[in-house]
């Protein structure tokens, strides 16, 4: 756990010794490759993830998350589109479909969340997102593209729990099978955050829409073992 010298007892939401306000904090709820802490670090500090083909510029504030937490929320994970980093389909979240989705939540500043979201949206980091609508309504569509829909999934320890996904959900998606490198990254993240072994992770990933029919649990387990 990273300790910020300007943190206050309520988690960093109060003032600082120099009289300035601490930056607001949000939880970023990751369900795809960012389940893996090393992969998230490429968005924070910049760099290319293991097995990936794209170099990320990183955040204005490259410091690690203040805290992490594991959660399972209702909905469905599916694979669609084509990832520039991994090839194959990217993971998306549909909160309106039945099922359960394991998440890994990272406590970040709103600026860090904005810069991670920008990189996922294939935009340049450096501009704070206006979170007013998603905080008030639970949903905000910033554009029609991948990861341009913000969702508020609840509150954890007094801070909003946010994620991003595609606007149309599974019904509006073009399913596409994920690559082996992508599945390895998701498998590592599930092991780190939820303690899942290779076969449990494989049974989950291989049966998600987009992967089902292209990957078997045995084939995914072989990647993860």
Image (spheres, rainbow, N blue to C red):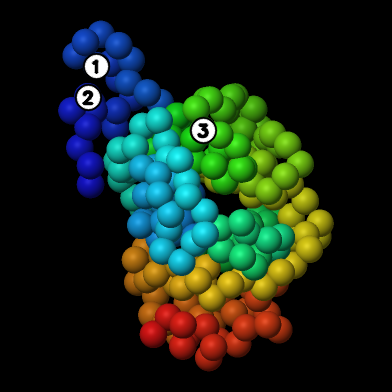
Q: Secondary structure at mark 1?
A: loop
Residue at the image point whose x is 47% and y is 46% from the top: 56
Q: Position of residue 114 (x, y in %)?
A: 51, 33
Toward which corner of the image does residue 100 lie, by quadrant? bottom right
**Crowd tier of the residue under label 2, counting other residues whose Cα lies within 10 Å: few below 14, some 14–19, many 20 or above:** some
Residue at the image point whose x is 52% and y is 59% from the top: 53
Disc 2 designates what residue? 6
- Looking at marks 2 and 1 on the same chain, the residue that comes earlier in the sequence is marked by 2
In-image side of 29 versus 213 (left or right) = left
Q: Position of residue 198 (x, y in %)?
A: 42, 82
Marks 2 and 1 close (CB-CB < 8 Å): yes
Q: Secondary structure at mark 3?
A: loop
Disc 1 designates what residue? 16
Residue at the image point whose x is 29% and y is 28% from the top: 12
Distance from disc 2 to disc 1, alpha carbons, whole Å, reads 6 Å
Q: How many marks?
A: 3
**Crowd tier of the residue under label 1, counting other residues whose Cα lies within 10 Å: few below 14, some 14–19, many 20 or above:** some
User: Would you say residue 121 is visible in this rendering?
Assistant: yes
Residue 125, numbered label: 3
């Amino acid at each position: 756990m990273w300790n910020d010298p300007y943190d206050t007892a309520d988690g960093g939401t109060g003032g600082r010794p120099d009289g300035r306000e601490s930056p607001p904090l949000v939880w970023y709820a990751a369900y795809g490759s960012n389940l893996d802490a090393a992969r998230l670090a490429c968005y924070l500090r910049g760099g290319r993830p293991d097995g990936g083909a794209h170099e990320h510029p990183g955040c204005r504030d490259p410091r690690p998350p203040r805290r992490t937490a594991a959660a399972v929320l209702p909905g469905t994970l599916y694979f669609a589109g084509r990832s520039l980093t991994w090839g194959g389909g990217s993971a998306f979240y549909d909160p309106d479909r039945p099922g359960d989705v394991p998440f890994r939540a990272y406590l970040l500043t709103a600026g860090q969340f904005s810069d991670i979201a920008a990189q996922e949206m294939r935009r340049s980091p450096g501009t704070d997102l206006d979170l007013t609508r998603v905080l008030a309504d639970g949903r905000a569509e910033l554009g029609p593209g991948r990861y341009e829909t913000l969702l508020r999934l609840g509150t954890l320890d007094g801070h909003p729990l946010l994620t991003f996904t595609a606007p149309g959900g599974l019904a509006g998606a073009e399913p596409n099978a994920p690559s082996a490198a992508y599945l390895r990254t998701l498998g590592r993240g599930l092991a780190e955050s939820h303690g899942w072994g290779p076969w449990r992770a494989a049974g989950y990933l291989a049966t998600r829409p987009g992967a089902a029919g292209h990957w078997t649990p045995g084939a995914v387990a072989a990647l993860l073992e």
